[in-house]
Image (cartoon, helix red, strand yellow):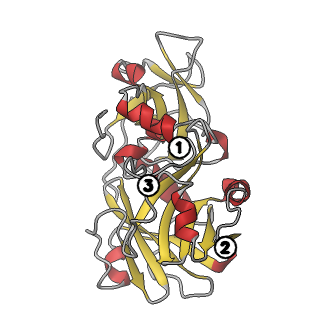
């Protein structure tokens, strides 16, 4: 399989119309979220953001978020629009008497992705070398630094609706999707609702799970998977000449009947073909040479493994 070049010079702004915002506001907003998410919201400072997951009782992810505080009593959860309404409804069921109000604030904020050298031109304080999950406030806007995609620095710009958009060349949303894939981090969307525990998407390796915090739905399953060394599925980056779809099965040549994995995210590579994040059995990934991984069926398009852009946290 011919592997496309990834040495692309991408710089500019993408409007992130596929994302929405859940606002959690009130004096007990942080306390409420502390009991629901995989992340330690209580310890999160105003200069940080985090990846976080909302799981069911079996530890399967119902949603994932880029989470940050606009103030000590206002927390924003940025997630995929296709699961936002259902996620808001589920989270609201747990509020009970907590002094916290949840709402769909997608119309209240504008979301943009910033990539490449454009980061350095937005504001002198916005240094593209900042570590992932740091946050900079620029007037009323919040700039959250994400994991690089294809080696390029990236950030999420969130500002009140009607605010001036960040300035820079236009970047197609399809290209941003590809950069998301090349970051190695898949966000939960409807096709993979409740398909994975966090470790199956490497969330523990990209600061998406805090193992020292208190209880949340599914915590026992998530902790047991980590501490008992039972992680048999991980997320991997792949390239293919086929056209992968989120939720599509992946097969290994050793078993034509049972899939070994599932596509968690996919996007067209600007240089040709498609790249994808596949959550699959570690044993299948260890024996993935010579076209032994295929898409959709045992005779589908071949998948080639690519290196992950971050190190995996080894089983504790």
Residue designated by label 1: 266
Pointer 1 or 2: first along the chain: 2
Q: Could you say which quadrant of the image residue 47 lies in? A: bottom left
At x 55%, y 61%, the residue is 33
Q: Position of residue 51 (x, y in %)?
A: 45, 56
Query: Can you see residue 37?
Result: yes
At x 36%, y 37%, the residue is 3
Pointer 1 or 3: first along the chain: 3
Location of residue 286 with respect to 38 vertically, above or below:
above
Name the side, left or right, on which 67 lies relative to 316. Answer: right
**In front of the other: 191 or 307:** 191
Residue designated by label 3: 179
> How far apart are the two marked residues, 1 and 2, measured between alpha carbons?
27 Å
> How far apart are the two marked residues, 1 and 3, measured between alpha carbons?
10 Å
The secondary structure type at the circle numbered 2 is: loop
**Total numbered labels:** 3
At x 46%, y 51%, the residue is 214
Mark 2 nearby-residue class (10 Å; few <14, some 14–19, many ≥20): some
């Amino acid at each position: 399989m011919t592997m496309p070049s990834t040495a692309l010079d991408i710089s500019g702004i993408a409007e992130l119309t596929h994302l929405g915002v859940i606002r959690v506001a009130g004096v007990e907003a942080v306390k409420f979220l502390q009991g629901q998410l995989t992340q330690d919201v209580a310890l999160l400072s105003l200069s940080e953001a985090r990846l976080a997951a909302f799981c069911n009782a079996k530890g399967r992810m119902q949603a994932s978020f880029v989470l940050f505080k606009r103030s000590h009593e206002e927390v924003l959860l940025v997630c995929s629009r296709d699961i936002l309404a259902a996620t808001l409804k589920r989270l609201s069921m747990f509020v009970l008497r907590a002094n916290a109000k949840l709402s769909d604030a997608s119309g209240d904020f504008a979301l943009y992705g910033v990539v490449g050298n454009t980061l350095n031109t937005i504001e002198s304080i916005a240094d593209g070398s900042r570590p992932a999950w740091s946050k900079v406030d620029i007037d009323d806007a919040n700039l959250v630094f994400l994991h690089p995609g294809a080696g390029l620095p990236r950030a999420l710009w969130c500002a009140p609706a009607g605010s001036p958009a960040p300035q820079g060349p236009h970047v197609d949303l399809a290209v941003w999707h590809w950069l998301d894939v090349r970051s190695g981090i898949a966000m939960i969307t409807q096709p993979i609702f409740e398909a994975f525990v966090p470790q199956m998407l490497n969330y523990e390796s990209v600061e998406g799970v805090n193992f020292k915090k208190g209880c949340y739905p599914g915590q026992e399953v998530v902790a047991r998977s980590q501490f008992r060394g039972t992680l048999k599925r991980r997320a991997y980056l792949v390239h293919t000449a086929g056209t992968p779809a989120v939720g599509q099965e992946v097969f290994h040549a050793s078993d034509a009947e049972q899939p070994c994995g599932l596509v968690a995210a996919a996007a067209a590579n600007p240089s040709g073909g498609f790249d994808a994040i596949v959550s699959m059995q570690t044993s299948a990934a260890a024996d993935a040479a010579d076209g032994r991984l295929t898409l959709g069926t045992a005779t589908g398009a071949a998948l080639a493994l690519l290196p992950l852009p971050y190190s995996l946290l080894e089983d504790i």
